[in-house]
Image (spheres, rainbow, N blue to C red):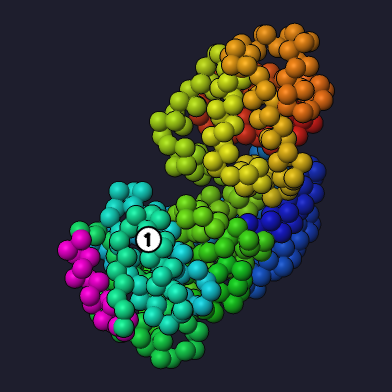
Amino acid sequence: MFESLSERLSQVFSKLSRKKNLTEENITDALNNIKTALLASDVSFQIVRDLIAEVKHACIGQRVLQNIQPGQQVIKIVYDKLVTVLGGELAALSDKRPLNILLVGLHGAGKTTSCAKLAQFLKSAGGQPGLVACDIYRPAAIEQLKILGHQINVPVFAYDHCDALTIGQKALKASAEAGCTVLIFDTAGRLQMDSPLIEEVKQLKTLIQPEEILLVVDSALGQEAVNVAKTFNDALQLTGLILTKLDGDAKGGAALSMKRAVNIPIKFAAIGEKLGDFEKFYPDRMASRILGMGDIVSLVEKAQTEIGDAAFDQIAHRAFEGNFTIEDFLTQLQQMKKLGSVTGLAKWLPGVPTFKASEQQEREWKHIEAIILSMTVQERKNPCLLNSTYRRLRISKGAGLPISEFNRFLKRYQTMKKIFQKFRKADPSQLQGIFQSFHNGQFLSGKKD
């Protein structure tokens, strides 16, 4: 997500950070590079022009604060402007219940999958969603929605040999009887100039009177996504957007252009293929990711969702208490695997856009797990036993790795334990330092053992 843009911006800020003072000359040079990076990411020219002008106005005449590098000041200014461009504040769904949500969009944007993701998201928040299959044109669309609904245990209202309006009318009555508090309507994919289908969805809107009309947009469309949003908004008066396929979008132009260009808030983002890869769109968090500052808050929320609050609290408690064993670390490692691969986790950490989580680092995790699983339970709970050369050789042989690999793991484990002890009494806001330590290589890469 935003890899290309983030890497370009990182290079700009790295160069600027070497300057002792902010001058109009070096600021202008940096802003020209930022402009090039944004345009290359398919951000609207007008938006880029306005953003650069605002950043320049804020930078010129700024005095460098004590202990703050010039580059850091510019990053803060750019960050604030990016947050504004992305929408400023979280745009939430209507709190009215029952709530009708109409999802629209082009062919292939991911509407049907987004319906299921949104339903699961609302269900996890305590709602009782239902899905309505109004896409009667795409082969197997109704069957796909039924399968997805079954996976998340959400009712799907589908009726054979009916038009979209009849389906919508029947679903309204059936969902009320079923006790649904939120009803999500999946509509047929359409081209923005396809008048008959646009007219159909307008009639469906009139029938169901939705409180929310969300446009599902493929983020890979870039600047074209803005034109799509304008067309649908003119016809339906959209209340929000869902950006899909952000995990595969290296540019990010759609996200950066959308809010200011069409004045419609981005409410959700699909960041992966799994049904759980769906989140609220926080402009400040997204701006942080774009600038390579990470998103620790979202990572913690994801961990709580995937692992569970009780398990998450227990892991956190064990990590920051004085007696952190290898057995505890194995539990953490296995729980972290639920969150995804090294590459997937890396995007949440500070410096992510320039941090290439490679196959080698994926192997690192597998080696670590193999080493730990080759130990006895007593050895995991009492690492002092590992001072024995015989035990080290036995464990290395059991893991199929050289003794040097075991020694490196043990040294990293000891470093990790010291880090947790150091932050045991720290303020929660300081926990980012731990993740930064991992990013710098103290554990994953072994560069700073």
Q: Main secondary structure of the magenta part?
A: helix
| Magenta highlight range | 162-178
Instruction: Give percent across and percent down for residue 424.
Output: 54, 19
The amino acid at mark 1 is Gly
- Nearer-the-camera pick, 198 or 144: 144
Instruction: Give percent across and percent down for residue 147.
Output: 41, 63
Instruction: Give percent across and percent down for residue 127.
Output: 29, 53
Above/below status of 447 relative to 423: below
Q: How many marks?
A: 1
Residue 174 counted in the magenta span:
yes
What residue is at 54 percent from the left and 79 percent from the top?
Answer: 227
Above/below status of 331 relative to 190: above
Whether residue 373 can be seen here: yes
Could you say which quadrant of the image residue 4 lies in? bottom right
Instruction: Give percent across and percent down for residue 107.
Output: 51, 78
What residue is at 33 percent from the left and 58 percent from the top?
Answer: 154
From the image, tell me which residue sits under label 1.
Answer: 149
In the image, 114: left or right of 74?
left
- Nearer-the-camera pick, 390 or 404: 390
Quarter holding the N terminus? bottom right
**Label 1 crowd bin: few (<14), some (14–19), many (20+), radius 10 Å:** many
Residue 434 counted in the magenta span:
no
In the image, 421: left or right of 13?
left
What residue is at 50 percent from the left and 68 percent from the top?
Answer: 110
Above/below status of 306 relative to 401: below
